[in-house]
Image (tube, rainbow, N blue to C red):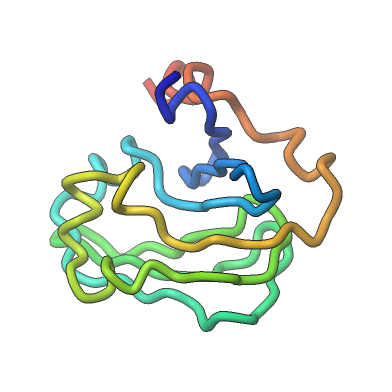
Amino acid sequence: MTITEKILCSKTHEYLLRNDDETYTIGLTDYAVEQLGDIVFIELPEIGVSYSKGDSFAAVESVKAASEIYMPISGKILEVNTQIVENPEILNEDVYEEGWLVKVKALGDTSEQDDLMEYEDYREEVG
C-alpha cells in the first residue's frame, strides 16, 4: 500500500496520515508543492503548542509565492521536521516520506476528518 492510499487531504492542500501510535503526520500534498515551485523557506510551529482545525500553523515560501499552512484537524504539536527547516528543498524532492511537516496528537474527535478527501478524490478535484 502506498502512502497516497493511506492519507486524507484537505481543500487547502494539506495531508493527514494516521500513524500506528494514534498520532497523525501532517504535510503538504504533492499538488501543493507542484503549484508552489521551488521552496526556499519554511516556518514550523513550536513543539507543545495546540491548534484548532483550520488554524494557520506554519508558512512556506517559494520562488513563486508565500503561503500559510492550515491544520486539517485540531491537534497538539508533538514533533516538527527540523530537517526541512534547514533544507526546504526536501519538500520538492520527497513530500510524503522525508518532507512531512509536523506530528500531532489529535485534540478533536474523528468527525473533524469528515470533510477531508481520500487522495484519489482530492487529485480529481484539483485536476
- Residue at 86% across, 49% down: 109
- Residue at 49% across, 22% down: 5
- Residue at 42% across, 60% down: 101
Indicate whether 89 appears above or below 32: below
User: Residue 22 location in percent, x, y?
Assistant: 70, 49
User: Residue 120 location in percent, x, y?
Assistant: 48, 17
User: Residue 116 location in percent, x, y?
Assistant: 65, 34
Outermost residue to the front: 21
Viewed as shown, does residue 82 lie left or right of 114?
Answer: left
Question: Which quarter of the rendered picture does the C terminus lie within?
Answer: top left
Given residues 63 and 86, the one toward you in this image is 86
Given residues 53 and 2, the one toward you in this image is 2
Residue 42 sits in quarter: bottom left
Residue 90 sits in quarter: bottom left
- Residue at 78% across, 45% down: 112
Question: Which quarter of the rendered picture does the N terminus lie within?
Answer: top left
Residue 107 sits in quarter: bottom right
User: Residue 64 location in percent, x, y?
Assistant: 18, 57
